[in-house]
Amino acid sequence: MTEAILRPARAFDAAPCAAIVEAWIEASRWMPRVHPPGSIAALFRQAIWPRSEVTVAEVQGEVAGFVALDPTGYVHALHAAAPGSGIGRQLLDAAKARAGSLSLWTFEANTHARRFYLRQGFREGRRSEGDNPEALPDVEYLWRAAA
């Protein structure tokens, strides 16, 4: 497992975080592109980051992942540059430490993420047939701290 330094995101982190998402979109053949290449950093700065607490994971001075968590415990985004590196788990553990419960949606086709959330103690909630900008079926995952 790669050990990362977790820290609050700063404005200049939007570009490397967006690059992680861009690479994930390109690698996920089932994922339609609904935002033009190069536009995700602006989307983060304008729509997601103002309403979220964003934590980045740094490895050797480079952003290796991030989590965007809103005050209600909703995870807007969780991405790691290298799936399987342990970065996602470290970021999710940090989010769990800040909230008594978490919720998020992931695409039904994203089997890697779905298995990951189940291993991290989440349970499946609702499903949608594509009530998202990508028009893809998705699954809600819920986590609650032990009483």
Image (cartoon, rainbow, N blue to C red):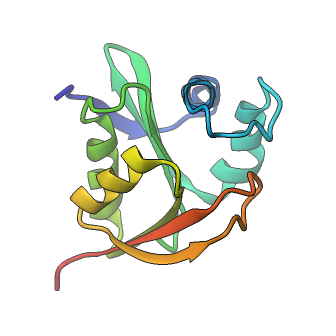
Nearer to the camera, 53 or 120: 120
Residue 40 in the image, given as x and y percentages of width and height: 73, 34
> On screen, 126 above or below 69?
below
Residue extending furthest right?
36
> On screen, 104 above or below 24?
below
Which residue is depicted at the point 57% across and 28% down?
13
> On screen, 51 above or below 27?
below
Locate the C terminus by quadrant. bottom left
Nearer to the camera, 100 or 85: 85
Residue 45 in the image, given as x and y percentages of width and height: 72, 41
Which residue is depicted at the point 38% across and 37% down?
7
Which residue is depicted at the point 72% across and 39% down?
32
Which residue is depicted at the point 27% across and 45% down?
89
Residue 83 in the image, given as x and y percentages of width and height: 35, 31
Nearer to the camera, 21 or 4: 21
Residue 33 in the image, given as x and y percentages of width and height: 75, 36
Whether residue 125 sits left or right of residue 120 in the image: it is: right
